[in-house]
Amino acid sequence: MTRSVFPRAAAVIGLAALLAAISVPSPAQAFSPAPGTDASLAVPVKGGSQMEAGALTFVSGMGDRALSFLRDQSMGQDGKTQEFRKLLESSFDMETIGRFALGKYWRQLSPAQQKEYQSLFRSYVVKVYSARFKEYSGQGFEAKAARADSATPTDTMVSSVIIPAQGEPVSVEWRVRNKNGGYKVVDVIVEGVSMSVTQRSDFDAVIQKGGGNVSALLAQLRQQAG
Amino acid sequence: MTAHRTASLPRLLLAAACTLALGACASTQQRTGGSIPDPLEGYNRAMFKANDAIDKAVLEPVARGYRYVTPQPVRKGVSNVLKNLKSPVNMANQLLQGDFKGLTNDFIRFAVNTTVGIGGLFDVAGNHGYKYEQEDFGQTLASWGVGHGAYFVIPVLGPSSLRDGTGMLVDSFADPLNLYLYNTDNEEWIYARWGATLLSTREELLEAVDDLRKHSIDYYATARSAYAQRREALLNDQKPEFSGAPSIPDYGNEDK
């Protein structure tokens, strides 16, 4: 005998409608830019398409540089970490990335603490990413396209893919800032997930657990980076 | 009794249509910058911890075993078939979201992959530019202006929200294949499909989960943020210009 699905389906749709009613529609959640991002303050350094082409070349070159030491079998883990540290210093705007990761808590710190935090943050990033190198298994990299970011005239978004030996390619976007005549990465977005935003959420949770005191995070970073 | 219940269905559809009309005014590009309200954090953290324990004890080892015993083309085939089975639900959601381009894309995928791709085993359409897009009722609700409501960690399945969890239920019960299996007393195949989907998805996420687990100080908060951002990217069909990621301020020009 066939059973009718309707009573159960109706009950479920009723439940669903109830749950949907609880989930408050929230247009107020619409993104509002962080203070200090007034577009008029930022000055584009180069003309649009020239800057985009430059950013694309920059990301492509950075990928080649990373692949060359990742693929170098004669180089040990320490050597690779050294190479990565150099790449990070030359191609990433670590001041900006570190400060964004701390969010509103930056202002709680004294200049000396800010300096200590930035140095701890760098060591932390180097440590975390060098651990990721160990998992390198022959992936390829290709920078594909660049486009201007309408919200931030100094920035170019460069899209790229990491191609594993087997399995699905991973899409990675680079937010590249043209500043003081050079290019620097300020965010990396993997399959729609921003590493900077994720890092900030992580740090924010640690600080909140420590009663809103940044020293809880600093202690963690000292421990992790050490 | 039954008559009463079935009569309520048109009324529900009417209610849905009203929601649609209202939702049309709401912006579809909500940028939350990876934040999601979490009033249930106490429960969520406990459930997340329990899920993590279950995952380490059962799901992850099974997924690793699955990867070990099957070659990549087989796993790809399994994943393709499961995705192809979701086509009717995907298409319904594209329609409800008013995304006709997406609907056409999914229709071509379904038609080509089911026939030329032998029951969905081979993603022939994907190789010709008709890429798979994950659509679900959670995204449909979002396109109507419904917010996440609250972050909600589902037992075993993990990160979700009141909205997306609701969407998952609706998708599951509206799925024509599930309805057919249920009505023909083949319910065990519904569970088999769930199990296969869980296993296949977990296998695809092996590296990502491993990475989050190892490289975050607060794994719970990091996973929550990644979930919110990922959903936002899916909601915008991964169009990078609508990525949820906020602009990064230019601190050098801001003060000092």
Image (cartoon, coloured by chain):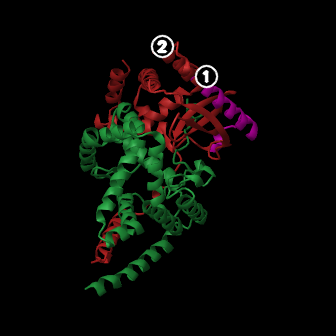
Chain colours: A red, B green
Q: Amino acid at mark 2?
A: Gly
Secondary structure, mark 2, is loop
Tell me which residue sits at (40%, 34%) in the image.
Answer: B211
Q: Circle 1 sits on which residue? A: A65
As drawn, A61 above or below B125: above
Q: Chain of mark 2?
A: A
Q: Quadrant of residue A16?
A: bottom left
Q: Quadrant of the N terminus of chain A?
A: bottom left
User: Which residue is at the front of the view, A44 or A223?
Assistant: A223
Question: At which x and y percent is residue A144?
Answer: 65, 39
Q: CA distance from mark 1 to mark 2?
A: 16 Å
Q: Give me the disc on residue A76.
A: 2
- Mark earlier in primary sequence (1, 2): 1
Tell me which residue sits at (33%, 61%) in the image.
Answer: B190
Query: What stretch of residues is rendered in magenta?
Result: A39-66
Q: Main secondary structure of the magenta part?
A: helix
Secondary structure, mark 1, is helix
Question: At which x and y percent is residue B233?
Answer: 51, 50
Q: Amino acid at mark 1?
A: Arg
Question: At which x and y percent is residue B193?
Answer: 36, 57
